[in-house]
Image (cartoon, rainbow, N blue to C red):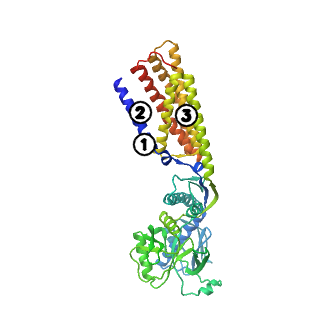
């Protein structure tokens, strides 16, 4: 008995002490959800078909390089919506083209004409579905990485359906900045400026073949006016942002302006050195999402694996740009279907009502237990108070977010914890009516009620797990608090209450039980 007493009281003391340590201070350790502290709720739609088009564009570039390497003549190789069309001269052999296409891609030939020398290739349906699914999954991870670096506490980011992503950002203040950060595609490209052609003619509509006009947008910090400077660029992408390993904000000591410093991986360093070495005295434009940020003149080969983006932006803009470059580009653009902002005043009202409901329900239960079960009811109240302490510690340990439905889960947990004690007390009452001693009645009461308590708690726990697995947002908050609460209530209602009763009946030799 002594050994049991000491290890049990040691276990209860340690568990209680750790829970208090984990939960203190409560305001800092348990984060409030969107419905309690306000914030943003976004529903995004991933335009997965754009990922298919990007894949085809990459295939076109690879095919052109392969044709050039193998000295195969071709008139044109371009993407036409969701297919690639290759026009060949009379001297080219179609079978040689087919071989190259099959070697570097998984395209399927859907038509060809010996007279027109025109071949059309398309992505198979199975491959297309895979690209679209991967685009949504990659978009989810990219958005999660950006938000993590942005510094939002306890965000909720999850997939809904085939191509939608739900984003909840509790406590966010600068909503516009967050939307821009999340929705930015961040497709970084390096393109050569075509200084050999007339910009004036291009602006009149005479854009040379293989060229395009993009703009550098500059915002006047004093007036807020936006000016646009046109650049005539070559469409060919010399390099993309896939090779970036790091992006950091630095300050230009000469002009005291922030800029973004880029670092490339080994392959990117080699490619950037080759590009700059072959195009000395030419301008290389740094383009992000079809916006020109800068177009410096290449003075010499840059072999150190570093580059920088300047653009007269603020520190916050430079910081956000560095985030999206580090996190990577979205594989496909995202469209905001719903942008809902929850005000902090609504959250404050919800907290007050939730706390009021919890306190009122808790007080009523405490009074009822003491009134109906006398001294035994007081023991149940002690176990219930301990239940709330352990629940707070567990939520802090698992970094659970408290939502309004989560508060409902806590209230339900309180009810279930008391329900377990009621089952035990009624069994003890029955045993006492049969004339058993206090010690024997306690043993029989706990033993016979245990299976009933276990069954009811396990079935509720299964339901909570299903809610957590398939629910979204607030439903998950309810499932989390309910799951933790059920586990904790089993410990307090069965183990702690039993320890107190055993102590009174054994150590204190209680001969009459107030129940």
Distance (Cα) linking label 3 and label 2? 19 Å
Q: Quadrant of the N terminus?
A: top left
Q: Are marks 3 and 1 in contact (CB under 8 Å)?
A: no
From this view, report whether residue 274 is shown above or below residue 323.
below
| Quadrant of residue 330 within the rendered picture | bottom right
Asked if residue 270 is positioned above or below residue 43 in the image, the reply reads: below
Identify the mark nearer the N-term, 3 or 1. Answer: 1
Indicate the secondary structure of the residue bearing disc 2.
Answer: helix
Counting residues from the start of the chain, the first of labels 2 and 1 encountered is 2
Asked if one can make out residue 472 in the rendered structure from this viewpoint, the answer is: no
Q: Is residue 284 left or right of residue 3?
A: right
Question: On the picture, is 355 further left or further right than 310?
Answer: right
Q: Position of residue 325 (x, y in %)?
A: 49, 66
Counting from the top left corner in percent of width and height, residue 23 is at 46, 43
Q: Residues within 10 Å of mark 1 (few under 14, many from 20)?
A: few
- Can residue 238 be seen? yes
- Image spot of residue 364 (x, y percent): 59, 31
Q: Nearer the viewer, residue 299 or 127?
A: 299
Numbered mark located on residue 414 in the image: 3
Residue beneath label 1, please? 21
* Other residues around mark 3 within 10 Å, as few (<14) / some (14–19) / many (≥20): many
Instruction: Give the residue at mark 2.
Output: 12
Which structural element holds mark 3?
helix
Q: Secondary structure at mark 1?
A: helix
Residues at marks 3 and 1, CA–CA distance in whole angstroms: 22 Å
**Residue at x 53% of width, y 18% of height:** 429
């Amino acid at each position: 008995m002594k050994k049991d007493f000491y290890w049990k009281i040691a276990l209860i003391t340690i568990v209680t002490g750790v829970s208090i340590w984990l939960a203190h201070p409560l305001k800092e350790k348990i984060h409030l959800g969107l419905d309690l502290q306000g914030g943003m709720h976004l529903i995004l739609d991933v335009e997965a078909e754009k990922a298919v088009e990007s894949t085809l564009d990459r295939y076109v570039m690879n095919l052109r390089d392969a044709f050039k390497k193998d000295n195969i003549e071709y008139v044109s190789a371009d993407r036409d919506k969701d297919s690639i069309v290759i026009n060949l001269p009379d001297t080219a052999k179609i079978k040689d083209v087919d071989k190259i296409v099959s070697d570097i891609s998984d395209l399927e030939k859907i038509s060809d004409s010996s007279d027109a020398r025109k071949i059309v290739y398309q992505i198979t349906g199975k491959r297309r579905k895979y690209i679209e699914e991967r685009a949504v999954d990659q978009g989810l991870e990219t958005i999660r990485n950006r938000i993590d670096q942005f510094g939002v506490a306890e965000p909720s980011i999850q997939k809904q359906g085939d191509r939608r992503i739900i984003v909840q950002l509790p406590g966010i203040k600068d909503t516009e900045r967050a939307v821009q950060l999340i929705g930015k595609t961040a497709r970084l490209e390096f393109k050569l400026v075509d200084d050999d052609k007339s910009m004036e003619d291009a602006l009149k509509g005479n854009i040379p073949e293989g060229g395009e006009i993009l703009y550098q947008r500059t915002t006047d910090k004093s007036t807020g006016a936006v000016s646009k400077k046109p650049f005539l660029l070559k469409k060919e992408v010399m390099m993309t942002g896939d090779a970036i390993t790091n992006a950091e904000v630095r300050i230009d000591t000469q002009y005291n302006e922030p800029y973004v410093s880029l670092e490339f991986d080994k392959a990117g360093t080699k490619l950037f050195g080759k590009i700059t070495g072959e195009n000395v005295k030419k301008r290389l434009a740094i383009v992000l999402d079809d916006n020109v940020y800068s177009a410096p003149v290449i003075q010499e080969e840059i072999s150190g694996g570093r580059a920088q983006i300047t653009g007269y932006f603020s520190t916050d803009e430079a910081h956000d740009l560095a985030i999206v470059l580090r996190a990577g580009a979205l594989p496909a653009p995202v469209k905001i279907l719903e942008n809902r902002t929850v005000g902090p005043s609504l959250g404050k009202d919800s907290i007050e009502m939730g706390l009021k409901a919890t306190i009122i329900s808790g007080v009523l239960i405490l009074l009822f237990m003491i009134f109906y079960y006398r001294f035994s009811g007081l023991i149940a109240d002690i176990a219930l108070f301990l239940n709330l302490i352990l629940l707070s510690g567990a939520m802090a340990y698992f970094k659970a977010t408290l939502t309004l439905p989560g508060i409902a889960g806590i209230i339900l947990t309180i009810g279930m914890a008391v329900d377990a004690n009621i089952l035990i007390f009624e069994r003890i009452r029955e045993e006492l009516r049969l004339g058993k001693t206090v010690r024997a009645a306690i043993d029989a009461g706990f033993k016979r009620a245990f299976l009933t308590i276990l069954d009811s708690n396990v079935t509720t726990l299964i339901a909570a797990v299903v809610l957590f697995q398939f629910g979204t947002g607030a439903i998950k908050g309810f499932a989390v608090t309910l799951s933790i609460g059920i586990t904790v209530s089993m410990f307090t209602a069965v183990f702690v209450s039993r320890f107190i009763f055993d102590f009174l009946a054994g150590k204190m030799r209680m001969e009459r039980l107030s129940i």
